[in-house]
Every structure is written in structure tokens, then in C-alpha cells.
Amino acid sequence: MSGSVDGLFLRINTDKDNLKATLELANDMLRNPKFDATEFEKMKLDLKSELESYKNEPQSLAQEAVQQITSLYPKTHP
């Protein structure tokens, strides 16, 4: 599962026999998210460190510039 300003993306791998149960689980995860406070704080710190490291990488800077130009929503969009 991932997301961006343009939407939420969910990738599921399952076989036909388990598809219904898998979709029900995905539905529950999306409608009833649960975050352990300690794990959530750790994820925020990890993400912040990762984002800081991108500030000096030319490829990341170029990708961000392209995303800003091609975004479906203006910068002022809520």
C-alpha cells in the first residue's frame, strides 16, 4: 500500500481461492486503520531521515521537479 497526492495504491497478490478473503482484509485495513503509537513514531522518524537524504540527490531533485510540473492538482489544493 502506498499513497501520494494523486491517490492511494494497493497491490494484492493472491490466488483465486483466497481472493474474497483478501479483498475483505484489504477493505478492513482501509476502513479501520490501527496504528501502534510507538511504531508510528518510528515510521515517521525513518521517513523524515529518508526525505532528508534525498535533498542532495540529483535524481530525487529531478523527480520532484517533474512531479510538481505534472501534478493533477495545484500546489494550493488541500
Image (cartoon, rainbow, N blue to C red):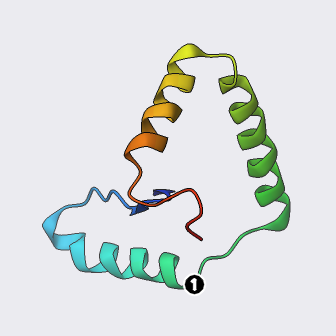
Instruction: Give coordinates of residue 69: x percent, y percent.
Output: 43, 41
Image quadrant occupied by the C terminus: bottom right
Question: Judging from the image, what secondary structure is the residue with disc 1 in?
Answer: loop
Q: Is residue 35 left or right of residue 38?
A: left
Up-down: is 58 above or below 40?
above
Residue 66's x, y, as percent?
43, 34
Q: Residue at x 51, y 76 (%)?
A: 29
Quarter that holds the N terminus: bottom left
Quarter of the image where one finds residue 57: top right
Q: Which residue: 38% across, 58% down?
A: 72
Q: Residue at x 49, y 24 (%)?
A: 62
Q: Residues within 10 Å of mark 1 (few under 14, many from 20)?
A: few
- Using the image as rendered, state which of residue 43 and residue 50 is in the foreground: 50
- The residue shown at (65%, 25%) is 54
Most foreground residue, 71 or 6: 71
**Disc 1: which residue:** 32
Image x and y of residue 68, in percent = 48, 43
